[in-house]
Amino acid sequence: MPDRNNTGLIALARAGDTAAWHELVRRYARLVWAVPRSHRLSPEDAADVCQATWLALAENLSRIRRPERLGAWLVTTARRETLTVLRLRGREAPLDGWEVADDGPTPEDAALARDAVLWRAYATLTDRCREILRLAAFAPELSFTQVAEAVGVPVNSLGATRGRCLALLRRRLGVEVAR
């Protein structure tokens, strides 16, 4: 395939010829790699840019109108991807090493604490409310009719009853959080 021009390779790649695709990548891989590295991106970020560039080509193979200018298209695409990475990286706050300040509970501890507050508030509800909310949370496949029958309320009042139970739970959560 090295003897084929870009027009032929692109046509074959559009038709699903992996050898043609590999030849395009072989021809332009160093050029695509050079763009993010010339902007001093790390090898990892440069690899991400290259991958995004090749993906863009794969998604746009049918839109390439001037195959002889494929190199310029790839450079432009790689430059745009590089600038996106640089813009996003500017929003990141680097850490000094891998140490993270121990300023409080871990995310896991915070989630467990919220979970405990929820269960304490849930325990204060009536049996009917607990059953309705339990079925809504753990058996979402049940129809309104099935839930109404299981709880012993009329079908047409289940929605309003559930709404009142949720409102009560929210209020009780507010009280628990305020403690």
Image (spheres, rainbow, N blue to C red):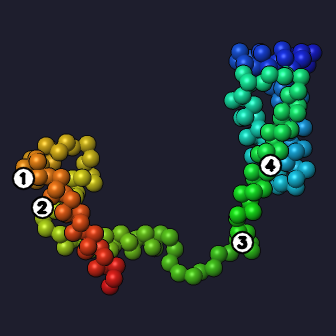
Return the disc, 4 or 1, that comes first in the chain's sequence.
Answer: 4
What element does badge 4 sit on? helix
Q: Extreme front residue here? A: 65
Tell me which numbered mark, 3 or 1, is placed earlier along the sequence: 3
Residue 123, can we see it? yes
The secondary structure type at the circle numbered 1 is loop
Nearest-to-viewer mark from 3 and 4: 4
Report helix, strand or loop for mark 2: helix
Q: Say which label, 2 or 1, has the lower sequence index.
A: 2
Rendered view: 3 above or below 39: above
Residue 144 spot, x, y in % from top left: 17, 45
Q: Residues within 10 Å of mark 1 (few under 14, many from 20)?
A: few
On residue 152, which mark appears? 1
10 Å crowding of disc 3: few (<14), some (14-19), many (20+): few
Tag of residue 95:
3
Tag on residue 128?
Answer: 2
At label 4, the amino acid type is Thr
Do residues under tags 2 and 1 come within 8 Å of each other at their CB atoms? yes
